[in-house]
Amino acid sequence: MTDHSANANNLSSNNLSTSVASTNSSVKIAIIGGGLSGLFTATLLERAIAQRSTQAHNEAEASNSVNTQHPQITIFEKSRSVGRLATRYRTDRLTNQNWQWAFGAQFFTAKSDSFAQFIAPWLQSGLLQPWCAQVVELTPADGNAEPIISKKEQWDTTHARYISSPKMTSWGRELADNLTNSSLKFKTRVAPLSTEHHQSTDQQTELFDELGASLGYFDWVICTAPNLQAIELLADSGFCKQAQISQAKMLACYTLMLGWDKVSMLPQTLQNSVAATTTPVWDVAYPQQSILAKIFVEHQKPSHSELLPSVTIHANNDWSEAHVNDDLEIIQAQLLVAAKQALNWNNDTAPSQVDCHRWRYAATVINKGEEGLGVLVDNDRHWIVSGDWCGQGNIESCYLMAEQVVEVVAAALSL
Ligand SMILES: Cc1cc2nc3c(=O)[nH]c(=O)nc-3n(C[C@H](O)[C@H](O)[C@H](O)COP(=O)(O)OP(=O)(O)OC[C@H]3O[C@@H](n4cnc5c(N)ncnc54)[C@H](O)[C@@H]3O)c2cc1C
C-alpha cells in the first residue's frame, strides 16, 4: 500500500511503542529519502521479499505451516514529492497551455544490463522513452559576432538517453504507486541518529522526526539522503563508516528556466525549423567559454510537443559551487546575460518567462577511472548509507546502489 498523504508526525510515541510491541515479529525496514535511490531500493526489496515468500509458501504448503509475516518497509521523505527529479510548470492563462522545465535530471542512461532490464516495462508502456536528441556545440555571441552553432552528435538508441513522459517526475510517481508492501511518508524529516537511538540488544533503531516524535523502531535503516545531509544525519551516531561518507564531494548547480509565448517569438538560434539552412537543428547545446554548461529544448523532446516553448539551462558546476551562497536574484541576472549571449535574443524575441533554481548538491565529483564508494554498511547497527553519490552520481547509480543495498539486506534476512 502506498500512503502518499499520511504524515508520521501525527503518530504519537505511545501508539508506535504499542504497535511495535504487538507486531514485533515482522521485520521493519526504514528508508530515509524518497528520491529514486529510495524508490528503487523499496521496489527491489519488495521483489526480493515476494520471491522469497512464494518460495517459502511452496515449502510451507508442503510441510503444512504457512507464515505470512512480510518485512514492512517505510520510506520517510521530508518534501512533498520525489527527490531531485524535478519538473516545474506554469500555465498560460490565455491558451491554457503549459511551459514545462525538467529542472533537475534531464535524462538518464541504462548502460548496465540489470538496469536496462529493470526499465524495459516502462519503455514498453511509453512512460520512458529514448531521446534521440541532436546535440550541438554553441559559441555565444561576442560583440557583433553571432553565436556559432556546430553539430556535435545525435544521441541514438544504442547508447540511449531516456526521459520520462509526460514529466521527469512521472516515473518516480509510478514507482511509488507500484509499491505494494511499503508506506511512503511525505513531509517527514528524519532527525539525526544518535548512539542512544540504537539498541544493541535487539539491533533495532528508533527514529525520530525533527520535532522529536518517534517514528518507530526499525531492524534496518537505509539512508539515501544526499551526501552532506547524510553526513549531518549520522554525525553523532557512531556509524562505523562516517569518515568514508565525508570522502564524497558534491557540487552545486544553478538552473535557469526560460519560456516564450509562441514558437514564432523564439530567437533565430532556437527557430529550428526555419533556420535549418543557417543553423543546425538542435535539441541540446553545450555552450563553449560560458558559465552555462548545457541548454535543453524541452518542447522538442518526445511527447512534449504540446508544450509552449520552454528551455532549461544548467550552469557550469564549478561556477555554481563558487557562487553557491550568492543572492538568487543576482545569480539569475548573471545567468540571463549568459543565456542572452548564447541564444542571442533581442527585445522582440526575449523570453516572457524566467525562473531560477539553486541545487546545493547536484553533481558528485568522480575522478576519471574511479568507481565510486559503493554503499556503506554498518553491520553491527544494521544501518546502510546509500544514494547516487555512492556511485557515479546519476540515476543509473541510484539503481546500482539499490541493488547493493538489497543484496546486503536480503543476505541478512535470508530473503
Ligand atoms: C541539476 C541536476 C542535473 C542532473 N542531471 C542528470 C542527468 O542528466 N542524468 C542523470 O542520470 N542524473 C542527473 N542528475 C542526478 C540525478 O537527479 C540524481 O542522481 C538522482 O535524482 C538522485 O536520486 P537520490 O534518490 O539518490 O537522491 P535525491 O533525489 O536527492 O533523494 C534523496 C531524498 O532524501 C530526502 N531527505 C534528505 N534528508 C532527509 C531526512 N532527514 N528525512 C527525510 N528525507 C530526507 C530528500 O528530500 C530527497 O528527496 C542531475 C541532478 C541535478 C540536481
Image (cartoon, rainbow, N blue to C red):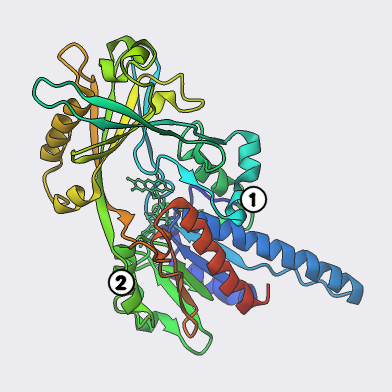
Q: Position of residue 165 (x, y in %)?
A: 51, 33
Give the crowd class for mark 1: few <14, some 14-19, many >=20 residues within 10 Å.
few
Judging depth in this view, the residue of 11 and 67 nearest the camera is: 67
Asked whether the viewer can see residue 360, the reply is: yes
User: Is residue 320 placed above or below 191 in the rendered structure?
Assistant: above
Q: Is residue 237 left or right of residue 23?
A: left
Which mark, residue 247? Answer: 2
Q: Position of residue 373 (x, y in %)?
A: 41, 70
Q: Residue at x 38, y 67 (%)?
A: 213
Judging depth in this view, the residue of 227 and 140 nearest the camera is: 140
Q: Position of residue 68 (x, y in %)?
A: 74, 68
Q: Amino acid at mark 2?
A: Gln
Give the crowd class for mark 2: few <14, some 14-19, many >=20 residues within 10 Å.
few
Q: Position of residue 149 (x, y in %)?
A: 28, 26
Which mark, residue 117? Answer: 1
User: Disc 1 to disc 2, how far (Cα)?
Assistant: 32 Å
Q: Is residue 81 left or right of residue 340?
A: right
Disc 2 C-beta below 8 A from ligand 1: no
SS at circle 1:
helix
Q: Residue at x 41, y 23 (%)?
A: 299
SS at circle 2:
loop
